[in-house]
Image: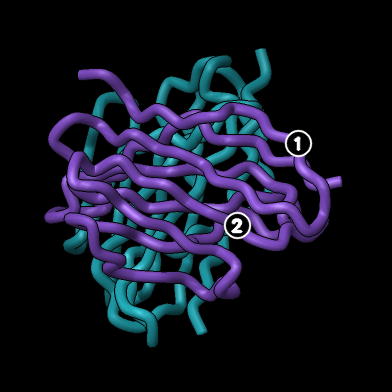
Chain colours: A cyan, B purple
Amino acid sequence: GQSLEQPSEVTAVEGAIVQINCTYQTSGFYGLSWYQQHDGGAPTFLSYNALDGLEETGRFSSFLSRSDSYGYLLLQELQMKDSASYFCAVRARDNYGQNFVFGPGTRLSVLP
Amino acid sequence: KAGVTQTPRYLIKTRGQQVTLSCSPISGHRSVSWYQQTPGQGLQFLFEYFSETQRNKGNFPGRFSGRQFSNSRSEMNVSTLELGDSALYLCASSSGTSGGSQYFGPGTRLLVL
């Protein structure tokens, strides 16, 4: 089967840095994505890593290590508006073809 | 560019009925994927359509089906609704040719009574 693990909750204060980890077990791995979802909203694409290393987009960075089946999302200079759920997702292959498998999500609470 | 649109936004049905949901992707995007989101199961992949063909599918029963039209708009149908089908149904569009970037619509919230 295919599975992803990430912490259920993370709490941090405004201005701080937080790292959300994601470990995965999949077959036919193509890449790791991160999405943000505010309560009542739709997931919003943040980043995608197909190769090992760090990708930086503004205050957000994402890292992938294919050999460790591990990645993380790093959020810097936290703002109150960053309070949301964050999902890692793997593009992988199973018996049905390629698909996206999402992690259970990490709820980030940013405190003043 | 306009974003992904989904209609209707809210729907109430009773068990045994069927429902059709619609999704219009971002202009130029040829891939539309459908997801079911529930508090208990999270985000689960239903299927992906690319150029009017189902390219990939998740592990859902045959009651869940879809199609894509030549303008890339997609519809999803659920027949013989069950209480457990109550969920937020999201569609996501992408170019279909690169990476993991998908752009989600606002979703259709379906309640089955």
Within-10-Å neighbours for mark 2: few <14, some 14–19, many 20+: some
In the depicted structure, whether residue A102 falls above or below residue B110: below
Q: Is residue B68 visible?
A: yes
Question: Disc 1 marks which residue?
Answer: B12
Is residue B88 found left or right of B40 in the rendered image? left
Q: Residue furthest right?
A: B113
Is residue A17 found left or right of A40 in the rendered image? left
Q: Is residue A109 or residue A105 the one in the foreground?
A: A105
Q: Chain of mark 2?
A: B
Q: Chain of mark 1?
A: B
Using the image, tell me which numbered label, if any, was put on residue A19: none
The residue at 27%/68% (across/down) is B55
Looking at the rendered structure, the number of numbered marks drawn on it comes to 2
Q: Secondary structure at mark 1?
A: strand
Q: Position of residue B32 (x, y in %)?
A: 31, 49
Check disc 1 and give the amino acid type: Ile
